[in-house]
Amino acid sequence: MPYLHGPPGLQAHPVPQNARTTHSSGQSFEQLRQGSLQTGSLFEDVDFPANNTSLFYSERSQVPFEWKRPGFWQHSEWLDVVIDDRLPTFRGRLVFLHSADHTEFWSALLEKAYAKLNGSYEALKGGSTLEAMEDFTGGVAETFLTREAPQDFYTILGKALKRGSLLGCSMDIRNAAESEARTPFGLIKGHAYTITGLDQVDFRGQKIELIRVRNPWGQVEWNGPWSDSSPEWQSVGLADQKRLCHAALDDGEFWMAFQDFRAHFDKVEVCNLSPDALQEDALHRWEVAVHQGSWVRGSTAGGCRNFLDTFWTNPQIKLSLTEKDEGQEECTLLVALMQKDRRKLKRFGADMLTIGYAIYQSPGNDEHLDKDFFRYHASLARSKTFINLREVSDRFRLPPGEYILVPSTFEPHQEADFCLRIFSEKKAISRDLDGTVDINLPEPSQPKPPEQETEEEQQFRALFQRIAGEDMEVTAEELEYVLNAVLQKRKDLKFKKLSLISCRNIISLMDTSGNGKLEFSEFLVFWDRLKQWINLFIQFDVDKSGTMSSYELRTALRAAGFQLSSRLLQLIILRYADEGLQLDLDDFLNCLVRLENASRVFQALRMKNKDFIHLNINEFINLTMNI
Ligand code: CA
Ligand code: CA
Ligand code: CA
C-alpha cells in the first residue's frame, strides 16, 4: 500500500465502503482484482486504454509514448477508480507527474486514476491542487489570503484542525525564477507546506499564539523566532514544551508565532472534510447538507440577479438555521457550489461556466419566490465572486433564521448540473423549494339549465347549432374545424393549428356525460374556459410577442393554479416549446388542457385526502388514452 506524504490525517481516511463502482464492466475493484488473480495476468484497463486517446483529446503527441508497467507494482487501494498500471513514458521516464524518487510510483498511479476520472491527462491541465484534494477526499476547499483573512482567523484554523481538515499554506512567487527559492528565514517560495498544529504558550507573562508548519520535504525549516532551536523556548515552561512536543529535530516541522506566519505566508488553503470522510469519533464534525440540481435552458437556467426577468426561475433552496455556534450569537456556514462533470466535457469543447450564488432572507413561506420578490428585496450575502471555477465556496456568519439560497450561472440559459453543499457548525435544515407540486384548480362550472339562458347565450345556441349539425353534439372533427377557423383570425396571438388529437383531449376534459362529444351545455362551459385560457395567454405574454416564452409560461401556469416542480417544468418546455423557447397559442392550449385533464383525473381517483392514486396496468393504460 503506497503512502501519501501529506498530513497524518490523510492516511487515516480510507474511501468509505460504499464507494460507487465506476468501471464499465460494473465490477468493483475487488472483483476485477480477483479476476486478475484467477487468470494470473496483469490487469488491462479497456476503459482507459494505453494509447493516445487517454492522453489527449485535442493535442497530438509530439513523440511516440510508450506505456510501461512499473517494476514495483502496487494498486492504490485508496480510490475505487480501477486503473491498470501502464503509465505513459518517453525514454524510460514518466511523462507526467512523478516523484523525486524514480522507483516510487504512487503519485503517478494516483494521477492516472484522476486522469481517468476526468477523461484524459490533457483534461487535467489548468486544474488546481484544491480540486484534486476535493476529489480525493470529497471535501470542500477554502482559500484564505493571510493579508485579508478575517479577524478570527486563528480560531477558524483551530476549528479546522479539530475537524480533521487538511490545511496547506504557501508563499506567492512573482516569476518562475522565484519558484522554490529559499528566503533568509529558511522558507521556500511557491512551495506547498502543510499546517499541522496550533497552540498557545505563556511567554514572559504573555499568551503567544503559535502555529506548527511542516515542509513535506522532511527538511529545510524556518529559522526565525520559535523555530527549533530559537532562544524563545528557553523562557517557556517545561510543561508547555512537552505539550508542544518541542524537540529540535530537523524533520521539516517547526513552530512559528502566528503573527510571523501571517507576515511570511501569503495563502492558506483548507480542505474541509465532510463527516463521512472522517473516521475518528473524537473529531468535531461539520454538519453537511447536499443538494443536487441542474440549470436547464428555458426552465431553471435563470442567470444571476443582473437578469431580473429570469433570475427567479433558478433553483431555490430554503435553509433554516436554528442553533447558534457554541458560545456565539451567530451561525457559521460554509456554502460550496460545484458544477459537475465540466472537466470531463472539456473533450467536447465545454469550458467551466461562471457560477455563484446569493442568499436572501426568507419571507416565511415555502413557495418558490417570484420575480417581484427579487425586484424589491436585496440579497443578505453572496458568493464573493461569480467565477469560472469548478467550485465557488465562501464562509458566512448569519443570525439564526430562515434563508433562501439561489445558485446560478452568471449568464442565463447556460446548462449544467450542480451540487450545492452547505457545511454548518450546528445542524441546519435545508430543503429544495422546486421539488413540490401543488395544484389549485377552479371548481368546474356546471352547465346551466336552458330556461336561465341570457339573450347572448341564445345567440350562442344558434352558433352551436351550425357547428354541431343535426345531431346537436360537437365531435372532435367539428371542434377542430371551428377552433382553427376562429383562432386563426386573431391577430394578437400566434397560432398555427390545433390538431385533431388536441381537440380529442379538449373533449375528454369537457365531456361530463361521457359520450365523447360535446352537447350544448358542455360546449358552453368549454367556450367559457377557452376565453379564460386566451385571456391568460394575453395577460402573461408580457412582451406582447404573440408567443409565450418559457419564463412567461411559468408565471401563467402559476396563475392558472399549477405550482409545478422544476423537473415537470423542464419536461413541459421540452415537449411544447420551440427552439427559441417559445410557445404559440396552440402549444399553450395543448399544455393547459393536458395539465388540467391529468389533474382532474387524479383528483377524481385519489383516496380521501391522500396524495397518491393506486392503479393496475389496465387502469393506467386506460387513463393515458384519455389524458
Ligand atoms: Ca523540527
Ligand atoms: Ca358529451
Ligand atoms: Ca412573449
Image (tube, helix red, strand yellow):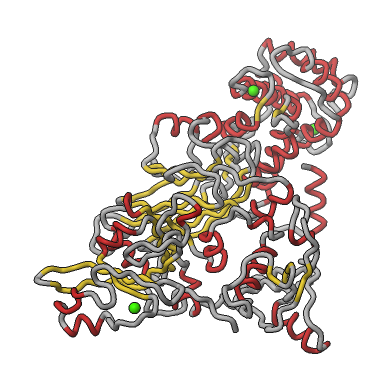
Q: Is residue 317 left or right of residue 604?
A: left
Query: Can you tell which quarter of the image residue 578 is in?
Result: top right
Q: Position of residue 478 (x, y in %)?
A: 87, 24
Give the residue displayed 78% in from the left and 48% down from the top.
Answer: 623
Q: Position of residue 612 (x, y in %)?
A: 64, 55
Q: Residue furthest right?
A: 470
Q: Is residue 186 left or right of residue 136?
A: left
Give the residue displayed 46% in from the left and 67% down from the top.
Answer: 273
* Closer-to-camera residue (29/190): 190
Q: Position of residue 349 (x, y in %)?
A: 71, 45
* Closer-to-camera residue (165/537): 165
Query: Can you tell which quarter of the image residue 209 is in?
Result: bottom left
Where's the C terminus, which quadrant?
A: top right
Image quarter for ligand 3: top right
Q: Is residue 118 left or right of residue 155?
A: right
Above or below residue 404? Residue 183 is: below
Q: Is residue 589 visible?
A: yes
